[in-house]
Image (cartoon, helix red, strand yellow):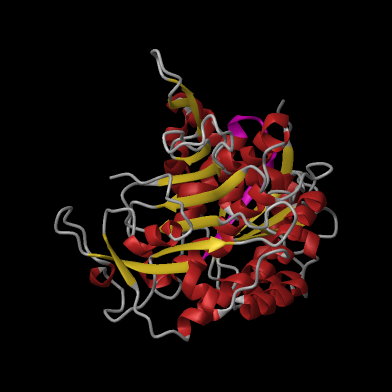
Amino acid sequence: MSQSNKALFIIFGGTGDLAQRKLYPSLYRLYIKGFLEEQFAVIGTARREWSDEHYQEIVRDSVKKLGGSEEQVEAFSRHFYYQSHNVKDTEHYNTLRDLSDDLDKKYDIGGNRIFYLSMSPNFFGTITSHLKSQNLVNDQGFNRVIIEKPFGTDYESSKALNDEILEAFESEELYRIDHYLGKEMVQNILAFRFSNPLIEQVWNKQFISNIQITLSEELGVEERAGYYDTSGALRDMVQNHIMQIFSLLTMEAPASFNSQEVKEKKMNVLTSLKQLSAEDVKANFVRAQYAHSNKKSLNGYLEEENVDKDSSTETYIAGKIELENDRWSGVPIYVRTGKRMAKKEAQISIVFKKSASPLYDTEETAENIITLYLGPSEGFSMTLNEKKIGMSMDTTIMKLDHLRSEGTIQESPEAYEKLLLDCLNGDRTHFAHWEEVSNSWKYVDAIRQAWDQSNEKLAQYEAGTVGPEEANELLAKDGHEWVWNPK
């Protein structure tokens, strides 16, 4: 059942790609579903000199293919206003405050404000301090700040950034957005685990051999080359998306699905991470860079525009994460992510130990595997053993699939849509808390520091493949292999 919410959204970076591809379509979906009705408004801010009319035209273009009537699209766009803005100019915040107050009265919003910082983190402190000093923070309703990644470049920078923002806002007013936490199948991890006693009873080291997380991207760095060459796969994907998925897979059951309960259980996992020495990093992590492919006519990373031709930035990382707690000690969690791989695929595979029964303790008996498909395909599969048809008692592999149809996937709420609604409702469950961010950074920093002190060259993998051979060797030395290995 839908419910109406009211708020003024102020989007810093309102002319940007994220706003047009994700934020405006997500707000429109909430609008046509009834979660937003008439008591809302949006102010887009950026340096460009746009009029309200031009801004509204941009908004209409970004949502017109999402359904609804022309009248709905037009009515939705009339809630959008534009303010040319220099984030360093105090006077501009005064103008923004006056417009905000006028719109609050016009739409009877009640003082509720959501500030969305879709800009470089370098400006977060400047923006939040001005929001406070120039009285854009309203004491009549709620004030919430949504922050996009990257949240710092290491633990020290992220802490400095967090401290700066906390001078203007309370911690419970901050919503650090990780769009993976809004994905339907990522949220399904907890439902799949804790609503199925059959699954939860075997979700531990007694039965599970290893866990594999793959976030594979088919595209290269594209227009993000300038940013990516200073970041790399470790900071861009592991510190946030992979560590969040990892936490959901390995946490204990919370007493309820509220923000504090879920945070505490995730933190118990992150504080149980095995600390990494330089030797551990060398033995358990692989970094690589995609190279030119003649077969598929794809550029190598060093051939991409805006990439330093001597760059040692990794576009791929594979590694083994280990926990030191009662449930998971001794179970390797393998992770990998990379650009310009064979196909776009995000999936989790839970590999169970082979049967200990002398009846079927043979090489022909397959490992039981549960796979969660996070996207673009969504659903589950299970690999089991069954008796071959015939006179013997030999086994053959049986695969059970529950994959959502394309139509069903299209009906799923988009990640940003779900997270924006959570923010409207004051629900921080599916946002990253500072304690999670800081612990993830400390773990990732140990890997980065070991790499920076190492003279080893990056491995290479041909663009359009599954990654370097070194990643296969990482699992082979433990007696395992990757479940997902498309040709």
Residue at 73% x, 39% y is 5
Is residue 192 rendered magenta in the image? no
Q: Quadrant of the C terminus?
A: top left
Q: Where does the image place residue 182, in percent across and percent down from the top left?
A: 60, 45
| In the image, farthest residue toward the left | 294
Instruction: Find residue 166 and report its image quarter.
Output: bottom right
Instruction: Find residue 195 and report its image quarter.
Output: top right
359 to the left or right of 244: left
Q: Where does the image place residue 192, in percent across and percent down from the top left?
A: 65, 34
| Residue 364 seen anywhere in this rendered image of the structure | yes
Q: Where does the image place residue 233, in percent across and percent down from the top left?
A: 45, 65
| Residue 79 seen anywhere in this rendered image of the structure | no
Nearer to me, 360 or 29: 360
Q: Where does the image place residue 272, in percent across and percent down from the top left?
A: 72, 63
Magenta stretch, main secondary structure class? strand
Nearer to me, 134 or 311: 311
User: Where 345 sits versus 405, above or below?
Assistant: below
User: Where 211 sits versus 125, above or below?
Assistant: above
Residue at 59% x, 38% y is 356
Residue at 68% x, 79% y is 160
Q: The magenta stretch spans which residues?
A: 31-47
